Image (spheres, rainbow, N blue to C red):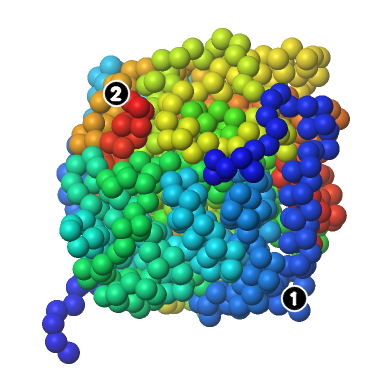
Amino acid sequence: LTSSPQTRERTGAPTEASHTTGTTRWMRATARITATEHALGDPWDPRNPTGHTALLAADHHGEPPAAATRLYHRLTMNAELVPTALGGRMEALDTLGPLLRPLFRRDATLAVGTALTSLTAAMAVWLNGDRAQQRRTADTLLTGGRTTTALPRLAHADPFAAGELHAHRGPAGIRLTGRKSAISNADTADLLLAVARTGTGPAGHSLLLLDPAAAPRLRHLPRHPTHATPGLHVTGLEFTDCPLPDDALIGDWGQGMELALRTLTALHATVPSMLVGTADTALRTAAGLALGGTPFSRPVTRVPLAEGALAGAFTDLLIADSLALTAARALHLIPEEGNVLAAAAKYLVPRLLGETLRHLCVVMQDALHTRHGEHAIFQKHLRDLPAAASGHLSTALCQTVIAPCLPRIAAAHWTAPRPAPAALFRPGAPLPPADPRALARFGGRDGLCAYAAHAARALTATARGTETARTLHAQTDLLLTELTDLRRQCLTLPTGTGTGTGTGPTDHRAFPLTDRYTLALAAACCLGVQANARPGSLLAGTDWIVLALHRILRRLGRTPPPPPAGPRKRMCEEVLHRTRESRSYDLYDLQLAG
Amino acid sequence: MSGHHPPHHPRLPARAHRAPGPHGPWTAALDDLRHHGTALVHASLTQWLPQRPPDARLRTLLGRDWPEYQARAHRRNGEQFRVTRTLLKHLAAAALAADPRDLELARTLTGRPYLRGCDHIDLSLSHTGDLIAAAITTRGLIGVDVEPRARPLHGRGTEQRICTPRELTRLRTLPEDRRNPRLIQHWTLKEAYTKALGQGLNFPFDRFGFDTSTDPPALERADGSPADAPGWTFRSLHIADRYTLGAALYDDGRGRTPDPALATALDPGAVAAVHRMLRR
């Protein structure tokens, strides 16, 4: 991730090897996922100190899960957050999400409190810091320390983005003043990344890296209660003219907002993949309940509503994972397009997963209302998913990234057969290192919608005769209509200054158009994953894609023909199969601990 | 005790405001939205039906719903469709300080309405006879349902299908004339709850219940024990002496958005930085 030569992987066209079972890098990652799963153990075992029972008890008491947190550090999982060039195990961005999923599967408090809080600050240092700052951050994490972030004050702020730190630079050095009442792990962090206001106008923010323990005139504020993830240690900090050394500054003075946005791109591209883990457990709970036969008098495969909910949830997880995979790989392969695709993934994935989890309530029924026993984890995950995704604050930031780019994106041709690099959609295929400088160039281009049209036509050309093929044809026509209409409407948005001058408001029409655009990108990613999947695999088949396109088109406000019953039935059977075998409901079909 | 305490604002207001037409006034509802984080409104279909804008304006107002309106135009419910969509859009537009024509009212896979691209507010709609009820919140999820109090539910076997055993037992302790209104109250609360979840009647109504002897009503499990449902608030209201309204709110803990205006939804400094990076 940093531009050191040690992280470079062989670049070039994907090899045949990458198309089969996976590269060495992917095999190393899956081995570590399996090891983490094994160490954390069967989450449904009530005697497991890192299982659901213990996690729910910590949640009930509003405390971080102690045993799981200790295990996280014993497994040296902080190393997953540190690039290999700095002595960690982070090889590329596309494996980061899957590697942290074992944490998100079990508990959002655990995952956010240990990994995600530290990652947010560390990512800013990897992408923007100098060698010494990177070394200091890496050493902190590799010795089991914590890093955290004081966010800037933003519009429509939640408590995390309320309040502001101010810094000024004079002959006596840098001075920091201000109060933030909600910072995750503020009381235990060894390093704090502060996005401080350092002026008015465009160059109004700077990034500062400091050790709270060494900062004079710093007062710790009491714990800030959180409704979701109540075990998270959120406290406040108040600085009063606190002197900081010159080397606290990351990047250039006044460039903080740009540096933060570049960091956000990398987080947007990796967090969605992590959230798939939380949804995996929720679906596993519902599927387990359905297999146990509790809510229904008949087998679940003979209750259309339940069958549809399970098959639909699995499909949505595959849609989310396809988008997450493509967004993460895009930062390596097409970084100048990556900012919008990553924001689209971060915008859509939590919404999609939240909707699908609520739909699983028709399977959960009475078990939705318990905080005890083997099904209690469902309600907790349903509550925690938006918090783990940083809720509306994050949605607004994703819209901030996407909306100004829409007129430019629409100005390019969308329907010409334009190949997106196949390597975008192939898990584990070789990647060039992510170049931080390229991430700073917001391209505002998109080749994926053009690819979607091309891939949809290619798919229908090979599918003939069957009911599924007829459905795919109709879906392709609707997708092309939608793309044309979406592009036409984006072209009516004012370009350049009109969608936001920095002082003027964003054109209101950009809000619904941004939403539709993210759904169109999701279709493109699904089609890409399907077209590049290992022949003969579930992902290379049409069952999931016909359901995925149906769900995406309906969410786009279109009226596709009802999909045939076969795909729904087989996708539900696949869910039940993976439930019995404890295998993951994602693109990777990995063995889990339970 | 010293100093003054801010007035207590429950998460669901105790009244629903009448909306006489598309152009409001929405002041009372917006006050509730500011103070409670939630507002409830009701409207008369008869009063709204004649307030039809000219075709050209209606077309831009309904936006992507225009084809569906045209398809329904010759059916009875065509104009109802127009009125309910218009009501929701104008209510949302008032809250967002936006032009209703710029907003898109979309539906989830289960048919739940939402405002596309505006995840900081949530909406719900219910309609019975002449009455339309709508709800809006900045707190999380909202569901609303209205029924005429005189709608005969009791004594037709309906209660066996929509009540838990505990609810049935309590119902039977009531005098005969209070049973139907009580059943209507439970029905509207159940509809409101499952609509907030986005599932409607797909969630079997006998798999959860309400204890309406308390205020606010409390959610119960199928066996009558208290449900673990942190974040949920319920309320029953009477409207115009003829209707019962049930409302269900899920507060996801994000806190109230004091100003949900769309113009301030995106941080101007961050938008400006994106533009600078695009120009680079």
Q: What chain letter is assigned to the residue under label 1?
A: A
Callout 2 secondary element: loop
Q: In this view, does A586 lie to the left or right of B180?
A: right
Q: Residue, x 67% and y 14% (percent of image)? A: A457
Relative height, residue B163 to residue A519 (above, below):
below
Answer whether residue A200 is visible to the viewer in this image: yes
Report which quarter residue B67 is drawn in.
Answer: top left
Query: In the current view of this chain or complex, which residue is farthest to the left?
Result: B3
Q: How far apart are marks 2 and 1 (CA)?
A: 56 Å
The N terminus of chain A lies in quadrant: top right
* Residue B105 at x, y percent in the picture: 40, 35
Determine which residue is flagged by label 1. A48
Q: Around disc 2, counting alpha carbons within 10 Å, would you say few (fewer than 14), some (14 to 19), or many (20 or more)?
A: some
Q: Residue, x 68% and y 71% (percent of image)? A: A74
Relative height, residue A135 to residue B43 (above, below):
below
Determine which residue is flagged by label 2. A496
Q: Residue, x 24% and y 42% (percent of image)? A: A203
Report which quarter residue A210 is drawn in.
Answer: bottom left
- Could you tell me how many numbered marks the image carries? 2
Q: Residue, x 18% and y 57% (percent of image)? A: A170
- Same chain, marks 2 and 1? yes
Report which quarter residue A395 is drawn in.
Answer: top left
Callout 1 secondary element: loop
Relative height, residue A178 to residue B53 (above, below):
below
Q: Nearer the viewer, mark 2 or mark 1?
A: 2
